[in-house]
């Protein structure tokens, strides 16, 4: 994709350079384990997924060069994989909890890549850690069992230094898990169960995607520090997205697939949003919010009953303005993070109304249990730091082969982690950082906000859905957030990082080791 930046590539090469020093590791050996494929794995579903360049019609005129995943079912339920209508984004994989998957990944891109299954709890070699990248023309074999709860997960590339560029190019798909308990709730299904991936993009006059480098040196650099913000909102890879809805109840699975943009989603007419699920599946009971805040990589599931709407009514979901997130607007005249804009429109049909019934209880979620937690009153702390035009964590940036003493946890234990985002970060000012941890789903225990940061916090924070299971949490400027997680299943080396992809690519990511 010639129009995309090569900034990422340089960083990747730098990272590769350090990976070749594996022998120099002090305490822990991070040698790449043999790829699995034990021979006695019996998949329920076998897929081929190719990451490949393509050209698609998005706007009238010239076709747009994108990168996309193309999937094929080789064995198992042919309906397990579907495409998003009329889109290069996706595909959508739907499986039942407990399913065993074999995925043959082929990298047809001109640069290294690897698939990460965001939110799934997987053995290290299946998780898509950046050191498993395969070169152009290479392939990778995944074999895993889906042990997660029913929920909306997703997958995307994870090559260090190039994730932002590759996701931006079009590589992102959904991984939807169902289970018997969820099925028994009779939530809206089939055409009434709709996945919506929200992203922002920026296009040149001849319809080509523009990423950071096109803004030129200093602007490209600022874009890296701020994260990319585009001026064209896309839903499922389409501009001006319209959902044709019947007068029935819907389950809308919203995913923020943007590199850096945060959304503050609300119905234009002020109807409150009914939230039934979040990153790691259903909440124990539906809750309502005047708006929901959705940071990069977060998912939210809404239950919406269009039966009460007038036949033919049009309804807009938009992103409300919020405070204090400067930067984006500098990007080539783009829309800044925090400005108001329309996200999608729902056109309600004219057929008969069928009122939906929302269960008052969805699932059992036990309250967070701090009894078993080793460090409940001295959390493991990760501070957002900034130095030399690069974000970091505890003053460190990503090194492929490095894990520090304070980044080692023990398998089978639970811990409280605290993410700290001090408001004043020198010349950079405060920025929100969506923090994501691989290999776990966690619970949000508490947030505390500095007094000076409260006002900006309140312009977004009331839309946080901290109930239920999470794998990504937005940490606002001047805020500290405590989460509780359990390293329950697999030992190995995983990453935790900011899911502002420009931040992660520049090094706001670290390894952590779950020690057996
Ligand atoms: Cu969605 Cu490490 O990422
Ligand atoms: Cu992830
Ligand atoms: Cu960040």
Image (cartoon, rainbow, N blue to C red):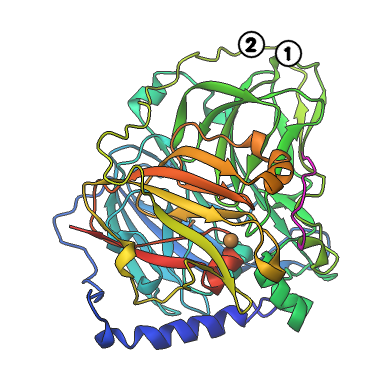
Residue 361 image offset from top left, x and y in percent: 45, 16
The front one of 211 and 25 is: 25
- Pointer 1: residues within 10 angstroms few (<14), some, or many (20+)? some
Question: What residue sits right under mark 1 in the picture?
Answer: 308
Toward which corner of the image does residue 216 lie, by quadrant? bottom right
Residue 444 visible in the current orientation: yes
Q: Earlier in the sequence, mark 1 or mark 2?
A: 1
Foreground of the two, 382 or 503 = 382
Quadrant location of the C terminus in the rendered image? bottom left
Q: Quadrant of residue 6?
A: bottom right
Pointer 2: residues within 10 angstroms few (<14), some, or many (20+)?
few
Residue depicted at 56% across the width and 42% down the height: 448
Relative to 338, residue 349 above or below? above
Task: Magenta stretch: give its range.
Answer: 319-327
Q: Is residue 83 visible?
A: no
Direction from residue 190 to residue 439 in the image, left or right: left
Magenta region includes residue 322: yes
For the N terminus, the image quarter is bottom right
Q: Is residue 123 found left or right of 332 in the rendered image?
A: left
**Residue at image coords 24%, 53%:** 490
User: Residues at badges 1 and 2 in contact (C-beta under 8 Å)?
Assistant: yes
- From this view, report whether residue 413 is shown above or below residue 228: above
Q: Position of residue 442 (x, y in %)?
A: 40, 42
Residue for badge 2: 355
Q: Is residue 340 magenta?
A: no
Residue at the left extreme of this rendering: 40
Q: Is residue 172 above or below residue 210?
A: above
Question: Closer to the camera, 483 or 20?
Answer: 483
């Amino acid at each position: 994709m010639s129009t995309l930046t090569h900034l990422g590539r340089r960083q990747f090469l730098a990272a590769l350079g350090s990976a070749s020093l594996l022998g120099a590791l002090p305490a822990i050996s991070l040698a790449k384990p043999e790829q699995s494929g034990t021979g006695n794995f019996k998949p329920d579903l076998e897929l081929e997924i190719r990451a490949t360049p393509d050209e698609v019609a998005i706007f009238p005129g010239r076709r747009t060069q994108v990168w996309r995943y193309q999937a094929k079912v080789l064995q198992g339920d042919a309906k397990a994989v579907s495409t998003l209508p009329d889109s290069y984004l996706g595909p959508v994989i739907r499986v039942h909890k407990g399913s065993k998957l074999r995925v043959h990944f082929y990298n047809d891109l001109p640069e290294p890549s690897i698939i990460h299954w965001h939110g799934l709890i997987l053995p290290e070699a299946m998780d898509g850690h950046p050191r498993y990248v395969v070169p152009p023309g290479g392939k990778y074999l995944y074999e895993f069992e889906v042990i997660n709860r029913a929920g909306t997960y997703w997958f995307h590339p994870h090559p260090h230094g190039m994730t932002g560029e590759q996701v931006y190019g079009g590589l992102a798909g959904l991984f939807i898990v169902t289970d018997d308990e969820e099925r028994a709730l009779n939530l809206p299904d089939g055409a009434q169960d709709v996945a919506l991936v929200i992203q922002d993009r920026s296009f040149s006059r001849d319809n080509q995607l523009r990423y950071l480098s096109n803004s030129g040196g200093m602007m490209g650099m600022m874009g890296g520090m701020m994260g990319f913000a585009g001026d064209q909102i896309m839903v499922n890879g389409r501009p001006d997205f319209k959902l044709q809805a019947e007068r029935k109840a819907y389950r809308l699975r919203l995913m923020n697939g943007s590199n850096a943009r945060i959304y503050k989603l609300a119905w234009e007419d002020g109807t409150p949003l009914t939230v039934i699920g979040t990153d790691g599946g259903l909440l124990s009971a539906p809750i309502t919010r005047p708006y929901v805040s959705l940071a990069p990589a977060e998912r939210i599931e809404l239950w919406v009953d269009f039966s009460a709407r007038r036949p033919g009514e049009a309804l807009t979901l938009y992103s409300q303005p919020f405070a204090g997130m400067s930067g984006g607007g500098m990007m080539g005249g783009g829309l800044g993070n925090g400005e108001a804009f329309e996200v999608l429109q729902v056109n309600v049909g004219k057929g008969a109304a069928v009122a939906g019934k929302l269960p008052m209880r969805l699932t059992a979620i036990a309250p967070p249990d701090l009894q078993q937690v080793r460090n409940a009153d001295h959390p493991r702390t990760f501070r957002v730091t900034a130095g030399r035009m690069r974000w970091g964590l505890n003053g460190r940036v990503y090194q492929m082969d490095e894990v520090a003493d304070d980044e080692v946890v023990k398998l089978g234990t639970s811990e409280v982690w605290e993410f700290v985002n001090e408001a004043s970060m020198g010349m950079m000012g405060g920025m929100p950082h969506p923090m994501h941890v691989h290999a776990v789903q966690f619970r949000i225990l508490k947030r505390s906000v500095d007094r000076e940061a409260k006002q900006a916090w309140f312009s977004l924070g009331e839309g946080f859905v901290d109930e239920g299971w999470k794998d990504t949490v937005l940490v606002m400027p001047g805020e500290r957030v405590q989460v509780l997680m359990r390293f329950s299943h697999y030992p190995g080396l995983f990453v935790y990082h900011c899911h502002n992809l420009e931040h992660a690519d520049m090094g706001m990511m670290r390894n952590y080791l779950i020690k057996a």
